[in-house]
Amino acid sequence: MDKLGTLSIFIQAAEAGSFVAAGQRLGLSGSAVGKAIARLEEEMGARLFHRSTRSMALTEEGSFFLDTCRRIHSEFETAQAQLSRSQATPRGQLRVSLPLAGMLLMPTIASFMAAYPEIDLDLDFTDRLVDVIEEGFDAVIRTGEVRDTRLMSRKLGAFKHRIVAAPAYLVANGTPDVPEDLLAHRCLHHRYANSGKLEPWPLVRDGRELKLDLPQTTIASTLEPLIYLAEHAFGITCLPPFAVASELARGSLTSLLEDHLAEAGTFRVLWPSNRYLSPKVRVFVDYMATSLFAA
């Protein structure tokens, strides 16, 4: 078990890129991690890291050893999980990456936490393309297709955006009946933080894409400001359905042009490919798949 512990320290140091960061993940001091790595290098008879005062990187031998350690660690976790009765009660820390808009998924996340109180969530909100395995995530929720062959995925649901406005705005400015009417309205747009591009409004007519040069009254890189501005009658915006579900339910926003919107995206949950899915990841994947679009 001591050897496995040392291998775990090495894996964390390699993934974190520093002894201090690895120690923070493991609850150890940076010096304790450094000493464990030094002992491992002595036992292996090979230098595993190139180290300087400012940086640390794996040697060629270290990269080879990291792949081997991951396989050993995965095999051990698989055997441990299969032999353990902990499958009946999923527990432990679950590290999940969500898009910035994932803040709006928090009602579903919160209900998962209530259902599985012995699972501790570590949530990371970002729109950048994370490396699930290298950065140590247990699961990632994203839209779009899966390109990383090292990952398993499950579709959580497809969705159409909703074009919405406050009743007070519509009283003052009129209600658009066809997409072209939007050209005369104040349009509030979402800009992707990672690319800087505006998210297109998926307008269609008779099933065919309809491109309009819509007014750009306000632009925001997150969804919450657009919801706020729309609720306070500053204009019309186009957002994912989960982002405005509560506002539509209580009537502070009204849905428009529903027959002129195409299916815009697919939510997926991704996780590292293993022969055995740990209980905490399994229940998270199942819960999100059955609950996220249940409403």
Image: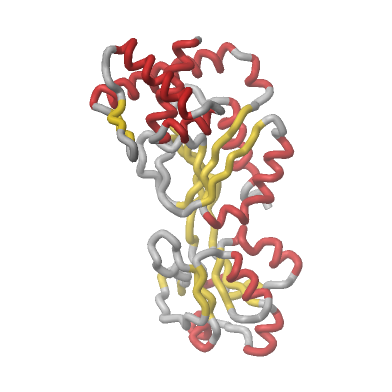
For this orientation, the residue located farthest to the right is 250
Q: Looking at the image, which is closer to me, 71 or 262?
A: 71
User: Which residue is located at x 41 percent, y 59 percent?
Assistant: 194
> What count of labels does the image hold?
0
Q: How is the image coloured?
A: secondary structure
User: Which residue is located at x 69 percent, y 45 percent?
Assistant: 110
| Side of 69 where 175 appears, left or right | right
How far from the left and from the top, in percent, is residue 58? Answer: 30, 30
Q: Quadrant of residue 175?
A: bottom right
| Side of 28 where 213 appears, left or right | left
For this orientation, the residue located farthest to the left is 60
How far from the left and from the top, in percent, is residue 4? Answer: 46, 14
Q: Quadrant of residue 252?
A: bottom right
Residue 56 vertical placement versus 164 (above, below):
above
Residue 84 vertical placement versus 53 (above, below):
above
How far from the left and from the top, in percent, is residue 87? Answer: 63, 21
Q: Looking at the image, which is closer to me, 85 or 294?
A: 85
User: Which residue is located at x 42 percent, y 79 percent?
Assistant: 212
Q: Looking at the image, which is closer to me, 231 or 4?
A: 4
How far from the left and from the top, in percent, is residue 285? Answer: 57, 37
Residue 22 vertical placement versus 174 (above, below):
above
